[in-house]
């Protein structure tokens, strides 16, 4: 079992970043992850200083990058999320100048959140079940840089609730070794992440990584025991939904042997379009995903 410690982190995906570990297909990895503040917020009193000094391109640190032996451009990584362990506390806050609501909020709007077994305690006021997920999973792009604050066609900050325990995330490989990195755990995140944060928290994520030769998807997609999930991103939510629907249309054409029209109609009849991240953050694409359950049967099989 390879363990990536919390101090081995990156804030961007880039082919030039040297790997911190090397693994083989089929290996198990445990990554230790920081919260989005890189461990700078421990109490409400820390929020103001963090906001004052926050660098928008140094958030959502991801553990890695990890070199996968024999991975070459055109391949895929199947990253199965086996467990997510949450730290003792986290926080949820509004990002000034961003988010769906911007008026009538308290200055420095934030709540500290404690973990209590399978539950979360918000500001000693509200208790609810935890819903752990991983916000950032990605590989290096062929060219340029994708920051861990942003989504990309190779992954990064996708913020999909579907990236939870039991899910397999399929990522394209664009560079030798893939350069996988994982981070941005949330103890809970509402679809849309409307304030700009979920419950940001440190944690540990255990995954298995399988190399699929010649199987690179155009962009990341997710599979669970019961559903196929296709993803999209765009400057607007409409653009993100369009891309996710296009991706699911192509997947159903293959999986169910349908033409484009019938695949599209099946999505409208049976697929669920959901919002990933729609916090209206300047310069950051919004994300959407389509969930299509596998309880479908071709009558001519």
Image: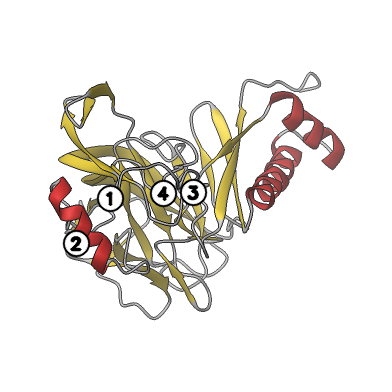
Q: Nearer the viewer, residue 236 or 94?
A: 94
Give how far across and how far down residue 10 sits, in percent.
30, 68
In this rendering, does residue 38 appear at all? no
Disc 3 to disc 4, C-alpha distance: 5 Å
Q: Residues within 10 Å of mark 2 (few under 14, many from 20)?
A: few
Visual colour scheme = secondary structure
In this figure, which residue is indicated by the disc labeled 3? Answer: 279
Figure quadrant of residue 84: top left
Label placed on residue 147: none
Sequence-first disc among 1 and 3? 1
Do the numbered discs 3 and 4 sit on residues whose CB atoms are within 8 Å? yes
Pointer 1 with pointer 3, Cβ within 8 A: no
- From the viewer's perspective, is 45 left or right of 177? left
Residue 159: give x, y in percent of width and height.
45, 47
Q: Nearer the viewer, residue 249 or 55?
A: 55
Q: Is residue 111 above or below residue 236?
A: above
Between the residue at mark 2 and the residue at mark 4, the CA separation in whole angstroms equals: 18 Å
Image coords of residue 139 (percent x, y): 44, 63
Label 1: which secondary element: loop
Give the vertical position of 1 relative to 154 (above or below).
Answer: above
Tell me the mark number nearer the camera, choosing from 4 and 1: 1
Q: Look at discs 2 and 3 and give the one toward the viewer.
A: 2
Q: Earlier in the sequence, mark 2 or mark 4?
A: 2
Q: Residue at x 18, y 59 (%)?
A: 6
Report which residue position mark 2 lands on.
Answer: 49
Report, in whole angstroms, how far the alpha carbon at label 1 lies from the one at label 3.
Answer: 17 Å
Left or right of residue 48, residue 291 in this image: right
The first of marks 1 and 2 along the sequence is 2
| Sequence-first tag of 2 and 3 | 2
Q: Which residue is mark 4?
A: 196
Say what secondary structure mark 2 lies in: helix
């Amino acid at each position: 079992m390879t363990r990536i410690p919390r101090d081995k982190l990156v804030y961007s995906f880039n082919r030039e970043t040297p790997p911190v570990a090397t693994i083989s297909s089929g290996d198990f990895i445990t990554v230790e992850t920081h919260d989005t503040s890189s461990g700078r917020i421990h109490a409400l009193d820390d929020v103001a200083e963090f906001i004052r000094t926050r660098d928008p391109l140094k958030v959502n640190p991801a553990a890695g990058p990890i070199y996968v032996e024999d991975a070459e451009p055109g391949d895929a990584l199947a990253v199965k999320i086996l467990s997510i362990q949450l730290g003792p506390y986290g926080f949820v806050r509004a990002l000034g100048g961003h988010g769906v609501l911007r008026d009538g909020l308290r200055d420095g709007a934030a709540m500290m959140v404690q973990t209590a077994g399978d539950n979360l305690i918000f500001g000693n006021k509200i208790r609810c079940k935890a819903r752990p997920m991983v916000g950032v999973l990605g590989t290096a792009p062929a060219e340029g840089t994708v920051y861990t604050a942003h989504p990309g066609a190779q992954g990064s900050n996708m913020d999909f609730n579907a990236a939870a325990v039991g899910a397999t995330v399929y990522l394209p490989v664009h560079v030798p070794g893939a350069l996988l990195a994982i981070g941005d755990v949330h103890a809970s995140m509402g679809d849309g992440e409307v304030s700009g944060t979920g419950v940001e928290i440190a944690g540990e994520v255990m995954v298995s990584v399988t190399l699929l030769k010649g199987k690179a998807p155009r962009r990341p997609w997710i599979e669970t025991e019961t559903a196929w999930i296709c993803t999209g991103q765009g400057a607007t939510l409409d653009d993100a939904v369009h891309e996710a629907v296009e991706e699911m249309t192509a997947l159903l054409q293959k999986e169910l042997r349908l033409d484009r029209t019938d695949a599209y109609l099946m999505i409208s009849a049976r697929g669920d379009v959901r919002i990933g991240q729609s916090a209206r953050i300047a310069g950051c694409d919004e994300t959407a995903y389509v969930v299509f359950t596998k309880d479908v049967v071709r009558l001519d099989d």
